[in-house]
Image: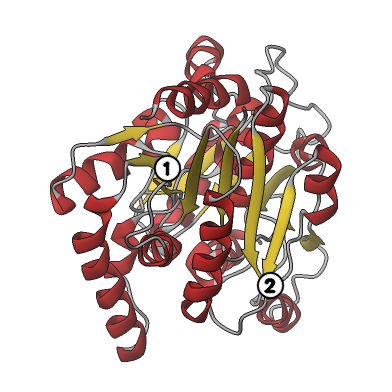
Amino acid sequence: MKKRIIFFLPFFVHGGASESIFKLSKFLIKKNFSILVISIGKNSYKHQLKKLGCDLHEIKSSRALFSIFKLRDIIRHEINKKYSQTLLISNIHYANIIALISCFKLKGIKIILTERSSLSELKIFKNPTFFLKNKIIYNLARYLYKYSDLIVTNSIYEKKFIKKNLYIKNIKCIFPPSIPNIKKINNNNNKFKSKKKIIYVGRLSAEKGVFTILKALNIIKDKYNFIFEIYGEGDQKNEIKRFIHLNKLGKIFLLKGYQKNKNLIFKNANLFINASSFEGLPNALVQSINHNVYPICSDSPGGNMEVIKFGKLGLSFKTGDVNDLKTKVVFYLKKNLKLKNDIRLNHLKKYTEKNSNMKYFEILNNIK
């Protein structure tokens, strides 16, 4: 009899969490697991997941909170099916709370909570409404997380944070499957010797700090020869377009949209910038190092500093500080910094799909 794995991710759109679940599902299907993926609303990976042989359930609900009873009905139905074991793997703090409430007093289900972002982000808020919402989620996490069978984080930072603040011991760190394999050849380009190619890859949303990058590069655009390519989609796209237009940056600041092929993104790039206010463990940051593209990242809560090996594989700047980022970019341009290949190759082993998948496989096989 197969084990049934239920993945619950409310917003299954293009991004790190969805990509990690897709890769893990592909691996587990080959290992004879049965997979159900539950989202709230449309699943952007619907066709790919179905092609793998996964079952899907798109809950129709206007808000994640309103999906609790529907999710409970689905889980109850799954428990009654003939599987050797049924496990629910929830993703991201608010979804974890919904999952725990939905499974209240249900027997025959094992609950694994994964933190692909950071609970510390709940201490960051834009207005009183967000403050209240984040405080409620954080307090619920402090009370409810102990009722899970296991918590999995994707950074050592988050593992330590949860241990310290939620007093939970049953917790493991599994790094995300950021790269399929390690690129051993130094493939950094020679096409842009005089003009450097700087890139950003990720969602175009406030927490990603794209405007921090725009403002920093705008300050130095007349002194240094570079182009800046922005890969991604999001609710700040029009604001970014407006900034580029108002500052007459259209020839060197280029919006490239979402690009699935990472080789095309990082090909010929020299510098990658991550300016997030908070992170889980960013795949794009790992991918930049794998493609031998020098990274500069914020020192935000989450896994950024782990990925750059605390300065051995990149530079960091104070989160949200435009002038500090500008200084670090100028330092990179003046020094023409390169990654040390021996450190890079050894460090990347922990972020491969094989490493991540095998660690999940071990947990799912042994959980009682």
* Image mark count: 2
Question: What is the spatial separation of the Cα atoms under label 1 and label 2, in whole angstroms?
Answer: 30 Å
Going from N to C along the chain, the mark reached first, 1 or 2, is: 2
Instruction: From the image, state whether disc 1 or disc 2 is nearer to you.
Output: 2
Q: Quadrant of the N terminus?
A: top right
Disc 2, SS: loop
**Mark 2 burial class by Cα count in 10 Å: few <14, some 14-19, many 20+:** some
Front-most of residues 92 and 291: 92
In this rendering, position of residue 367 left or right of residue 44: left
Q: Residue at x 37, y 82 (%)?
A: 126
Q: Amino acid at mark 1?
A: Asn
Write down the residue under mark 2: 41
- The correct choice, above or below, for 67 with respect to 121 in the image is below
Displayed quadrant of residue 211: bottom right
Marker disc for residue 349: none
Write down the residue under mark 1: 304
Query: From this viewpoint, is residue 242 visible?
Result: yes
Q: Residue at x 27, y 54 (%)?
A: 145
Q: Residue at x 57, y 41 (%)?
A: 5
Residue 210 image offset from top left, x and y in percent:
57, 65
Q: Amino acid at mark 2?
A: Gly
